[in-house]
Image (tube, rainbow, N blue to C red):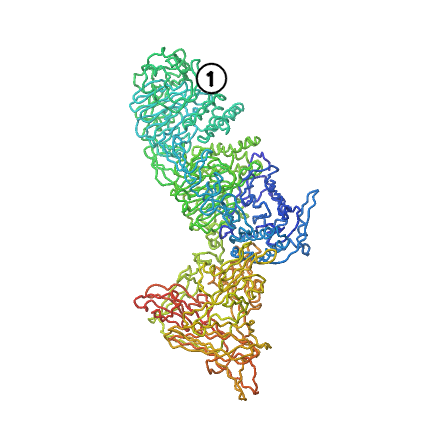
């Protein structure tokens, strides 16, 4: 576009460029409310956005492919390919150093800026950069471990300055990149390693992106590989959080490749880099790896006292910002971090220290904890990096400088060109004092005004013109120097009147006058915000309106606004002023020592203004400079020598008998003090400069320095200096030769308009007052101070001037506000209060109003307390937060902002805003918003809506944020936050003077110091003072001034009296100059819109936009032929929208301009998402995150209701919720319970809408449940397991394979029990290192094992079925100590122990009277469950194991097992006897009898025949292969094929499958609202891109049902309880006998005998006969089930009925074979021992009623399990 276009256009409302319609425009962008996404957690899984390279030439693409490219050539890592402009291009090359490939150079072209990285060097555009570096939207910072390059275009690159480099890309570049990182399309292999249907090798793929130099030749290598140890390295406990998030296979391959191609000197390097990359990728996947490095393996050293961590907080807490970690949005990273309880000392750079040891900084100096500094008005001490200051009793100072610049007691500065006598300050409560100042025009233009007289009026009626040197009661007046007169009072007021080069006055009031003064100097209450408050009770909007109310003469006209810039009238004057006045702000100049105490900016501006404005430029310039010197002296900073280079004519023009002094604080060199010294000679005052008599001489009444002998004596008298100019009767008079010579004469008798009469002072008698005491409506309550009678037309007695040339009765005087008049009874709106005119005063309501902080344009700020400043920085900064001071841990919000630059000057063209609101983070950027759920903070409800061009966020904690989607933002806070916030918006305490409070609680004066203290990251570089953009781009200045003049033009006339346009005009010019390339009109339009919004809030609606100036094209939204949409400059009334159907809007939200629709009656609701008027039924619903849902959609939420259903065509939205009962959740429509009250009434409860439980009670017939325990004519034969067993002899280690029991009983009756498998340590790396599962280590981890184990078994975790002797490692497995494996004992290039497990056999010998002999298991191979014939013959002796139940109160049973000689391996027989007083369960394995026709004894086994149709089915556990992958191509894949590939042992063709969402285990898939495939042929598959608007699958899990034909024993009769195993040629099965006895219930399962007739008389070996299954059952016990806590009350209890269990979603049979019940608190006790009346049977389940429990009247919490057979 044309850079000098005189008009600025607009954009179409959807944000698209309008040039396609032939418009040559730019301007405001209005968009629909776009919802981006909601993410859970601060850093969700984002591996798919990360590309990396590391170690031995390994690469990982964005899409997850890992390949190896062994080359030292230069390659394109990634670049933007599918675009007309290349936003970024990143290249890299490697070199081999000490046989290790490292990255030698990285070149990055980022939006036109070239960044070059090499070891120890960072260059930007060919120039070496000092880190941290920030420019043009690129931030480069260095940590002890990495160099980070962050580009605001959406890219982050991290290099460890060695082998590892990664690039993280914004998802907006998806499918738009190319290079070694791939195309970023979310699909592996595709488009990277396939070309024209052929698969490419990594080298071929790399050749596409190789960019060699013109004369370069690079090398490529060929690699081989083998495999060892890597899987264990990457699957250790340090990576336990990674295994479900990240596939290990490709990293194992990379590790293997590394290990094979490094020699012994570089083993550590080879393995460390891939392990490090796996750890980094785990972090990107959302995991948190733990420390895996040791001092012997891959050790990392850190500077100072820092510690290396694999997963540390990258947002480092520092002395300057100890809360940085609380706002961290980045995931953890590896590197060097401070130990817990410490922060990094970024002040002294001394490493990590305790927060209490942090130093403080002030004015460039460092203070240790406990050190203090003092200034004029406060004492400050340093503690823990924070300043704690105590204010001293300091007077307030008001200054009138340059004849027009006024600085109030509270520090509010303004400019006013008056032409009257004004009240500078007075005692508002009485008449103790009044100070008047005569401001008159002293030049040809209206803006040339001078202070010509200062008058002090006292309560006694004395009036003092301060020129004479005189003494009155309570007042001392004397001349301190030739430049200054001092007026000292006894009631806390001091005046310093400067006479040369021009008259200026400084008024110091002691603190006794706080909140008691009024006048042009303000009310002295430390609140700048109400300094413009007038006597009528309201606050004026502009300085001119305020000052006009303090004139003392009715005849003086009101001053009108003028926006002329004096320096624009004369180029020579501007150059002169710029040359001299700029010396005030020179950071290396004469005035620099005072910059830290007094900001020179305002004084420089006044100097420029006055120098250009005055006829005598030098006099006004020097006066302005001396004003700064005077202010510095008041702060205790003496500036000497400044007159040697500037304004030296005043120091060199002293009379010959005088000398010049820079600092005088006492006046004692006068003849009066010498001759007749009094107390005035010892009065001290603020240091002043001027000419004084040299040492030894004194000033006489003629102003000559004479020796002491020539001094006269003094007693009263006054002198008017020759040549002095005064004003008399409106004429200019000069003192010449003792008489006043006046220019022009005023008429003696002017004609007066009736009823006015002329008062002639020349003929009046003494004491008569004239025009100076004329009353008017504005000054009716002001006392007259008359120094002389002034002739003129006056209103007769009883009337006062109406200010318009007429007279009026006093009771008819109107009220005035902002230059408008109001009649009695009229009301106006002032902020949030209503004011009514009565008796010339405003009577206002006293509501506490919200404070507003405004941020607009290129770093322009207006704090909550009204302080204006400009600060431009490239970092993230805290705007405001309520985590301040003592409330540091209990806040509710933070607002962070970051500038997004454009143009060559880096000017801000948009802002990124982060609003931390309770447990949510809202990110506002590029016109849209994103919601991220955080894990900390309370829930703070909020609403998001579109109002015109603004996005408005209103939270119920009292915060409102309004953003124009570009650079303007307004934050409103409830008054409850007053004094409790901090940041760039100030502390909101009503005092603007302390708004520049830094993070360390120091109050500074420089906006740069203030702004830099609130940057979020201490590593981001400080902002520096920038050159004025209009100076840098002078060709833009005239264009900017012309465009921005609209602010001062007639267009905004109605607002000029309400909001001073000066600061907005200056900001507009500055910003428009800065936008030199791109965004020309954006900057201009935003600046004007900021002023227009300020006018709107002040009540002045300005329609300033036009087709030529920043238009908004609202017609874009109008359908063809319709006209619903219109531009409204002041917003619209509260609209009825889909998001706000009740039309309830906050009264605190001001009118906001933009496009608004006028919805027709048939479609009364406005849908902000589609920007159309709709019927209510079309609105749908909105989630808490603001996302829109159409009718019929289900709304996911983490709260109850768990699922929201949108019902259309209803007045209210119906919600089908999850009901919560007894801690359990029930879906909509489910029966919660169906039971009886025990008194002939049935009770039911059903989960209904909105999460309510619908209960019903009705009469029913009482039934008595019966208990039926069926028998089970089958038994399962368990499978044996092989382990390594070491016998009790510690000196002998033998490997045995045995069928080992869990528990068995020895001959003397004491039990021996095998412990669980212990794995308490993981092999440590390096030497010394290894695995140590010793008893001491096991006990140290809290496990209980016996003091002297009888046996020990050891195994490798990865090879549980392989003997230790076969794993190929040297291991000590000792029954006396445990297991020890040392890395140094192992062989290979990288010796490393496997991870081992142990278990021990413990026996209770105390139950024996004599020591029994040890029974060693017979060595055997694992038994086979199918019938086979073996030729192996072994002999075992017959033994009998007797089991006797000890110490029981119930009858016991004895089971005998006889094992005779056999030709089979000896079977392991386990007899478990469990005895309890209440229940007895006995399982017996009967004998098998085989009748024969011969008299010989024959032992026959069971015969096994082919299975005919009988199936035994088992459900697997729930299987979850990990979190769903992200992206449009991602999802959750739990297919049967993937499950088997992941190592799960399930059948490949299951009978059935069941699927559920992990988050919602109680809901059916059909209730979740997702499109999911779940069937036995495939398994479970869910795709993100099929999930509607959410575009994200839940995390699913699956279980499968596998069936197989199993041999069964079917024997018709039971003959005995003795098992006899005869000669056989089959492996012996394991026989298990469980006996459980109880007195109350007996359940017996009997395996009957089997009779097999034979026809031969010889001994036969036969298996167990298995015939076709006829009614054979397979039974399974469920897990323990608990439906929740018992309900309270007499009608409550615990209902775990079978019906309720099924209704709650549990998959159990409706008619179980058996049930078992127990109390959750007492799992080891039988129900009969609990003393409660409980029903527990298979037909009902479990029911317990409170009112049946005796005195206690409360049921325990019970749980139940059921036995289902099929």
Which of the two residues, 1494 or 926, is positioned nearer the viewer here? 1494
The part of the image, by quadrant, that contains residue 1339 is bottom left
Residue farthest toward the left in the current orientation of the protein: 460
Which of the two residues, 132 or 542, is positioned nearer the viewer here? 132
Residue farthest toward the front in the current orientation of the protein: 1291
Q: Is residue 1404 left or right of residue 335?
A: left
Please state the horizontal and vertical placement of residue 570, each as a whole percent of the image.
52, 24
Q: Residues within 10 Å of mark 1 (few under 14, many from 20)?
A: some
Please state the horizontal and vertical placement of residue 373, each as a whole percent of the image.
41, 33
Which of the two residues, 1240 or 63, is positioned nearer the viewer here? 63
State the residue at coordinates (70%, 45%). Answer: 217
Residue at which label 1 appears: 652
Residue 1666 appearing in the image: no
Residue 721 appearing in the image: yes
Q: Is residue 434 left or right of residue 1038?
A: left
The part of the image, by quadrant, that contains residue 1392 is bottom right
Above or below, comparing residue 1657 to residue 741 in the picture:
below
The local secondary structure at tag 1 comes to: helix
Above or below, comparing residue 453 to residue 1142 in the picture:
above
Please state the horizontal and vertical placement of residue 134, each as a whole percent of the image.
55, 39
Quadrant location, the N terminus? top right
Mark count: 1
Please state the horizontal and vertical placement of residue 1760, each as a whole percent of the image.
42, 68
Above or below, comparing residue 159 to residue 798 in the picture:
below
Which of the two residues, 1464 or 628, is positioned nearer the viewer here? 1464
């Amino acid at each position: 576009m044309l850079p000098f276009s005189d008009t600025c256009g607009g954009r179409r409302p959807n944000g698209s460029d309008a040039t396609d319609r032939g418009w040559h425009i730019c301007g405001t962008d209005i968009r629909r409310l776009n919802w981006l996404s909601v993410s859970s957690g601060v850093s969700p899984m984002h591996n798919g956005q990360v590309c990396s390279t590391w170690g031995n030439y390994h690469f990982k693409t964005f899409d997850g492919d890992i390949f190896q490219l062994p080359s030292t050539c230069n390659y394109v890592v990634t670049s933007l390919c599918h675009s007309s402009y290349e936003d970024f291009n990143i290249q890299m090359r490697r070199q081999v150093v000490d046989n290790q490939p490292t990255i030698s150079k990285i070149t990055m072209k980022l939006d036109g800026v070239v960044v070059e990285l090499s070891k120890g060097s960072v260059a930007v555009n060919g120039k070496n950069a000092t880190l941290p570096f920030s420019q043009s939207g690129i931030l480069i910072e260095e940590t002890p471990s990495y160099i980070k390059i962050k580009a605001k275009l959406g890219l982050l690159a991290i290099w460890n300055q060695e082998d590892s480099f990664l690039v993280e890309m914004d998802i907006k570049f998806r499918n738009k990149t190319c290079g070694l990182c791939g195309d970023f399309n979310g699909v592996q292999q595709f488009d990277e390693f396939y070309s024209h249907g052929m698969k490419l090798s990594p080298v071929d793929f790399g050749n596409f992106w190789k960019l060699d130099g013109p004369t370069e030749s690079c090398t490529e290598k060929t690699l081989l590989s083998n495999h060892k140890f890597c899987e264990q390295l990457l699957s250790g406990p340090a990576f336990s959080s990674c295994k479900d998030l990240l596939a290990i296979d490709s990293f194992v391959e990379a590790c293997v490749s590394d290990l094979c191609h490094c020699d012994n000197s570089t083993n550590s390097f080879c393995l460390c880099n891939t392990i490090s990359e796996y750890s980094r990728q785990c972090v990107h996947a959302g995991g948190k790896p733990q420390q895996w490095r040791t001092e012997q393996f891959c050790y990392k050293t850190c500077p100072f006292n820092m510690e290396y961590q694999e997963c540390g907080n990258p947002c480092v807490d520092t002395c300057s910002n100890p809360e940085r970690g609380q706002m961290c949005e980045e995931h953890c990273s590896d590197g060097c971090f401070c130990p817990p309880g410490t922060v990094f000392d970024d002040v002294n750079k001394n490493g990590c220290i305790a927060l209490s040891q942090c130093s403080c900084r002030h004015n460039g100096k460092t203070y240790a904890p406990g050190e203090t500094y003092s200034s004029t008005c406060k004492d400050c001490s340093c503690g823990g990096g924070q300043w704690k200051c105590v204010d001293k009793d300091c007077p307030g100072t008001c200054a009138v400088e340059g004849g027009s610049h006024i600085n109030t007691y509270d520090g509010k500065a303004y400019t006013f060109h008056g032409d009257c006598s004004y009240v500078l300050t007075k005692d508002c409560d009485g008449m103790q004092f009044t100070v008047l100042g005569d401001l008159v025009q002293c030049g040809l233009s209206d803006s040339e005004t001078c202070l010509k007289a200062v008058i002090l009026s006292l309560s006694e009626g004395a009036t003092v013109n301060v020129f004479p040197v005189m003494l009155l009661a309570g007042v001392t007046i004397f001349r301190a120097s030739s430049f200054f007169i001092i007026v000292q009072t006894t009631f806390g007021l001091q005046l310093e009147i400067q006479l040369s080069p021009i008259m200026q006055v400084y008024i110091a009031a002691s603190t006794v006058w706080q909140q008691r003064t009024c006048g042009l100097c303000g009310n002295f209450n430390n609140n700048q915000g109400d300094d413009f408050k007038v006597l009528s009770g309201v606050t004026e909007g502009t300085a001119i309106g305020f000052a006009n109310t303090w004139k003392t003469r009715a005849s003086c006209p009101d001053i009108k606004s003028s926006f002329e810039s004096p320096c624009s009238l004369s180029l020579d004057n501007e150059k002169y002023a710029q040359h001299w006045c700029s010396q005030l702000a020179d950071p290396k100049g004469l005035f620099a020592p005072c910059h830290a105490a007094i900001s020179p900016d305002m004084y420089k501006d006044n100097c420029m203004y006055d120098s250009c404005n005055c006829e005598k430029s030098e006099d006004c310039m020097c006066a302005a400079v001396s004003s700064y010197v005077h202010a510095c002296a008041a702060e205790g900073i003496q500036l000497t020598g400044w007159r040697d280079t500037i304004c030296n004519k005043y120091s060199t023009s002293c009379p010959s008998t005088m000398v010049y002094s820079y600092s005088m604080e006492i006046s004692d060199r006068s003849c009066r003090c010498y001759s007749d010294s009094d107390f005035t000679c010892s009065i001290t005052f603020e240091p002043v400069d001027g000419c004084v008599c040299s040492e030894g001489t004194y000033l006489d009444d003629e102003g000559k320095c004479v020796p002491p002998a020539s001094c006269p004596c003094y007693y009263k008298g006054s002198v008017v200096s020759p040549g002095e100019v005064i004003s008399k009767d409106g004429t200019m008079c000069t003192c010449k030769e003792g008489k006043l010579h006046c220019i022009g004469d005023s008429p003696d008798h002017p004609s007066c308009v009736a009823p006015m009469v002329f008062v002639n002072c020349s003929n009046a008698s003494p004491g008569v007052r004239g025009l100076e005491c004329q009353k008017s409506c504005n000054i009716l309550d002001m006392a007259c101070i008359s120094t002389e009678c002034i002739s003129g037309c006056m209103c007769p007695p009883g009337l006062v001037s109406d200010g318009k040339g007429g007279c009026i009765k006093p009771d008819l005087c109107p009220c005035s506000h902002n230059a408008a008049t109001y009649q009695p009874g009229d009301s106006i709106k002032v902020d949030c209060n209503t004011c009514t005119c009565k008796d010339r005063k405003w009577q206002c309501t006293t509501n506490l109003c919200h404070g507003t902080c405004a941020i607009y344009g290129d770093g322009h700020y207006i704090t909550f307390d009204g302080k204006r400043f400009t600060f431009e920085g490239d970092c993230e900064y805290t705007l405001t937060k309520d985590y301040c001071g003592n409330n540091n841990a209990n806040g509710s919000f933070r607002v962070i902002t970051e500038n997004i630059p454009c143009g060559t000057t880096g000017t801000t063209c948009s802002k990124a805003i982060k609003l931390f609101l309770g447990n949510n983070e809202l990110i506002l950027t590029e016109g849209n918003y994103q919601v991220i759920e955080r894990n900390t903070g309370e829930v703070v409800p909020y609403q998001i809506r579109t109002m015109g061009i603004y996005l408005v966020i209103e939270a119920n904690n009292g915060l409102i944020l309004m953003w124009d989607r570009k650079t303007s933002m307004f934050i409103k806070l409830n008054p409850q936050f007053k004094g409790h916030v901090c940041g760039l918006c100030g502390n909101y305490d009503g005092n603007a003077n302390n708004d520049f409070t830094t993070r360390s609680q120091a109050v500074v004066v420089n906006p740069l110091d203030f702004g830099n203290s609130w940057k979020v990251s201490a590593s981001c570089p400080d902002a520096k003072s920038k050159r004025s953009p209009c100076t840098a781009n002078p060709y833009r200045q005239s264009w900017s001034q012309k465009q921005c003049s609209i602010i001062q033009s007639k267009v905004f006339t109605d607002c000029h009296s309400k909001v001073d346009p000066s600061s907005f005009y200056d900001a507009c010019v500055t910003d428009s100059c800065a936008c030199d390339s791109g965004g020309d009109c954006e900057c201009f339009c935003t600046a004007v819109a900021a002023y227009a919004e300020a006018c709107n809030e002040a009540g002045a609606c300005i329609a300033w936009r036009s087709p030529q100036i920043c238009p908004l094209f609202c017609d874009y939204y109008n359908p063809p032929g319709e006209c619903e949409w219109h531009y409204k400059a002041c917003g619209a009334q509260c609209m009825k929208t889909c998001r706000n159907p009740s039309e309830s809007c906050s009264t605190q939200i001001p009118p906001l301009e933009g496009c608004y629709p006028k919805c027709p009656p048939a479609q009364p609701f406005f849908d902000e998402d589609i920007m159309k008027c709709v019927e209510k039924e079309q609105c749908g619903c909105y989630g808490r995150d603001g996302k829109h849902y159409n009718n019929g959609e289900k709304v996911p939420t983490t709260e109850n209701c768990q699922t929201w259903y949108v019902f259309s065509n209803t007045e209210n939205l119906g919600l089908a919720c999850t009901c919560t009962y007894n801690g359990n959740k029930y879906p909509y429509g489910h029966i919660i319970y169906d039971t009886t009250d025990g008194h002939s009434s049935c009770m039911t409860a059903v989960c209904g809408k909105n999460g309510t439980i619908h209960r019903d009670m009705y009469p029913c017939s009482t039934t008595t449940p019966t208990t039926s325990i069926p028998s089970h004519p089958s038994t399962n034969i368990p499978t044996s397991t092989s382990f390594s067993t070491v016998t009790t002899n510690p000196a002998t280690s033998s490997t045995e394979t045995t069928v080992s029991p869990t528990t068995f009983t020895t001959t003397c009756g004491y039990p021996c029990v095998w412990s669980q498998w212990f794995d308490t340590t993981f092999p440590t790396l390096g030497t010394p290192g290894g695995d140590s599962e010793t008893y001491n280590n096991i006990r140290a981890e809290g496990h209980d094992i016996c003091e002297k184990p009888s046996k020990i078994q050891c195994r490798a975790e990865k090879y549980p079925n392989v003997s230790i002797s076969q794993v190929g490692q040297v291991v000590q497995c000792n029954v006396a100590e445990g297991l020890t494996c040392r890395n140094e004992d192992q062989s290979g290039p990288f010796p490393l122990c496997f991870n081992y497990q142990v278990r021990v056999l413990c026996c209770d010998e105390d139950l024996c009277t004599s020591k029994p002999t040890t029974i060693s298991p017979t060595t055997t191979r694992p038994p086979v469950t199918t019938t086979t014939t073996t030729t192996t013959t072994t002999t075992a002796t017959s033994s009998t194991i007797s089991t006797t139940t000890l110490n029981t109160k119930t009858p016991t049973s004895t089971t005998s097992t006889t094992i005779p000689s056999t030709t089979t391996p000896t079977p392991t027989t386990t007899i478990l006897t469990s005895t309890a007083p209440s229940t007895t369960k006995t399982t017996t394995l009967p004998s098998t009898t085989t009748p024969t026709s011969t008299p010989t004894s024959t032992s026959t086994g069971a015969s096994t025949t082919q299975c005919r149709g009988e199936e035994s089915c088992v459900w697997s556990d729930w299987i979850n292969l990990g979190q769903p992958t992200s992206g449009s191509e991602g999802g959750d894949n739990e297919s049967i094929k993937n499950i088997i590939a992941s190592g799960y042992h399930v059948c490949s063709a299951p009978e059935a499958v069941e699927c559920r969402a992990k988050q919602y285990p109680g809901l059916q898939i059909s209730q979740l609202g997702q499109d999911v495939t779940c069937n036995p042929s495939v398994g479970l598959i869910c795709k993100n891109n099929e999930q509607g608007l959410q575009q994200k699958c839940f995390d699913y899990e699956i279980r499968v049902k596998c069936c197989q034909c199993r041999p069964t024993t079917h024997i018709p009769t039971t003959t005995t309880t003795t098992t006899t195993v005869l000669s056989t040629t089959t492996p012996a099965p394991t026989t298990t006998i469980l006996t459980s006895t109880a007195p109350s219930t007996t359940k017996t399962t009997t395996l009957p005998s089997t009779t097999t007739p034979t026809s031969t008389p010889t001994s036969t070996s036969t298996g167990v006969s298995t015939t076709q299954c006829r009614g054979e059952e397979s039974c399974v016990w469920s897990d323990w089930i608990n439906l929740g806590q018992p309900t309270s009350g007499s009608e409550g209890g615990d209902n775990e009925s079978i019906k309720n269990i099924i209704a709650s979603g549990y998959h159990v049979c409706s008619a179980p074979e058996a049930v078992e019940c127990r109390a959750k608190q007492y799992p080891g006790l039988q129900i009969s021992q609990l003393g409660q009346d409980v029903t527990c049977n298979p037909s009902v389940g479990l029911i317990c009623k409170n009112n049946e429990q005796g005195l206690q009247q409360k049921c325990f919490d019970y749980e139940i399990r059921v036995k289902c057979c099929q």
